[in-house]
């Protein structure tokens, strides 16, 4: 009996590591597929196949479901594949979210109350935010791994610009000068967001990341949670001092208050809202901030979460499960 095959759609003809053990456990072959190697007429592909022991190049029928590992907007090859294997049989249509698009999607859902005030960046929106909040976050609309998350603030008529550190990198006498200083750091679209003073654990601000995935029942579930503790001199968690379990960080910050079940509920709602608007998804992560009063804020969603980050939580069983889930979901899609 032939083993089931799961397609991994990629722009690069090279193995995608990390899923081999899960494929062996589930008894499936992985077929890495690039658009240029698809025989559209015969519904075949010259792919890289992991057969439980090694990756080998060979011809195979098009798999009945695909896990899209492209990084970017929905590629045209997804639509073309779905005309052959069926609608929504390729999941993760989009693997790079636009933060403003996601904000608008969530703002039109029941999650609006959990969103910081946000807007596309412009000199006018900068002026409005500083008048209203006195400080704001300015960051790329499409992620740069936290490398350009800027903090701007007004204090006694002076304007300060921070680039990852609590100490400012520049001071300006007017908003016009601040705008010029900001624009020298910008080379793409940015958004501006209300600054949330985050709660601390071990004296460091932290966030909570929830990994939301679909499995063999086709339903969203939270399969992993962690917290990133910021460097002592930073206001952002993207470049972290340490990673620990969410239970540990939240427990230190808010002893006796169990916020995790609510974070799980909100994560699933966010995943459902994103998929309804953007098309077939199978995994994403939701980053939450908890302010100093314990209020929950949705900071952003990530379309291609780094599973390897969960290595640092020190739970090998958890790590195995989060790599196995997308393959289970692919099997579910292939069978429906």
Image (cartoon, rainbow, N blue to C red):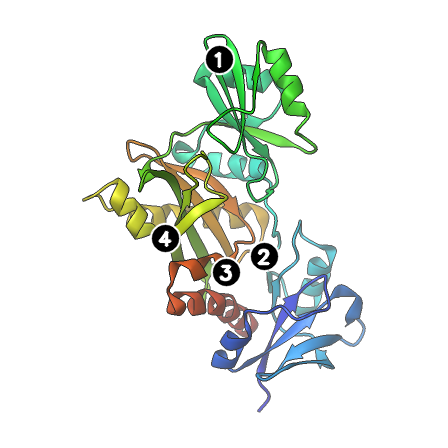
Q: 243 or 220, which is in the foreground?
A: 243
> Is disc 1 in contact with disc 2, using a CB cutoff of under 8 Å?
no
The image quarter in which residue 93 lies: bottom right
CA distance for labels 4 and 2: 27 Å
Residue marked by disc 1? 131
Residue 184 as seen in the image, left or right of residue 5 = right
Mark 1 or mark 2, which has the lower sequence index?
Answer: 2
Q: Secondary structure at mark 3?
A: helix
Residue marked by disc 3? 308
- Image height of 299 relative to 50, above or below: above
Q: Secondary structure at mark 4?
A: strand
- Image height of 263 relative to 320, above or below: above
Mark 2 or mark 3, which has the lower sequence index?
Answer: 2
Q: Residue at x 38, y 69 (%)?
A: 317
Residue 116 as seen in the image, left or right of residue 45 = left
| Disc number for residue 244 | 4
Q: Residue at x 21, y 43 (%)?
A: 255
Are there few (<14), some (14-19), or many (20+) residues within 10 Å of tag 1? Answer: few
CA distance for labels 1 and 4: 37 Å
x and y, in percent, of residue 259 in the image: 28, 45
Closer to the eye: label 1 or 4 = 4
Closer to the eye: label 4 or 2 = 4
Mark 4 or mark 2, which has the lower sequence index?
Answer: 2
| Disc number for residue 12 | none
Residue marked by disc 2? 92
Q: Secondary structure at mark 1?
A: helix
Can residue 232 be seen in this snapshot?
yes
x and y, in percent, of residue 218 in the image: 46, 64
Are there few (<14), some (14-19), or many (20+) residues within 10 Å of tag 2? Answer: many
Closer to the eye: label 1 or 3 = 3
CA distance for labels 1 and 2: 39 Å
């Amino acid at each position: 009996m032939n083993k089931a095959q799961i397609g991994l759609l990629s722009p690069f003809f090279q193995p995608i590591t990390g899923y081999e053990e899960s494929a062996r456990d589930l008894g499936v072959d992985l077929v890495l597929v690039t658009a240029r190697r698809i025989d559209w007429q015969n519904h075949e592909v010259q792919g890289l196949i992991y057969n439980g022991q090694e990756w080998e190049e060979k011809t195979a029928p098009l798999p009945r479901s695909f896990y899209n590992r492209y990084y970017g907007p929905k590629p045209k090859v997804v639509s073309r594949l779905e005309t052959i294997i069926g609608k929504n049989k390729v999941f993760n249509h989009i693997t790079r979210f636009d933060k403003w698009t996601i904000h608008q999607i969530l703002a039109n859902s029941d999650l609006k109350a959990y969103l910081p005030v946000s807007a596309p960046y412009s000199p006018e929106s900068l002026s409005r935010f500083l008048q209203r909040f006195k400080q704001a976050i300015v960051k790329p609309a499409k992620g740069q791994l936290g490398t350009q998350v800027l903090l701007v603030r007004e204090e006694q008529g002076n304007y300060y610009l921070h680039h990852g550190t609590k100490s400012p990198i520049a001071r300006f006498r007017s908003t016009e000068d601040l705008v010029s200083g900001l624009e020298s750091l910008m080379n793409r679209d940015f958004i501006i967001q209300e600054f949330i003073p985050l709660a601390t654990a071990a004296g460091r601000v932290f966030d909570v990341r929830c990994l939301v995935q679909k499995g063999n029942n086709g339903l969203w579930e939270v399969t992993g949670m962690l917290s990133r503790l910021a460097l002592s001199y930073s206001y952002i968690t993207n470049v972290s001092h340490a990673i620990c379990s969410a239970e540990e960080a939240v427990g230190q910050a808010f002893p006796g208050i169990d916020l995790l079940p609510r974070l799980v509920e909100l994560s699933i709602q966010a995943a459902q809202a994103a998929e309804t608007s953007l098309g077939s998804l199978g995994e994403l992560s939701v980053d939450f901030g908890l302010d100093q009063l314990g209020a929950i804020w949705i900071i952003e969603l990530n379309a291609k979460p780094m599973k390897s980050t969960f290595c640092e939580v020190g739970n090998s069983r958890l790590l195995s499960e989060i790599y196995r889930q997308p393959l289970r979901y692919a099997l579910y899609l292939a069978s429906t």
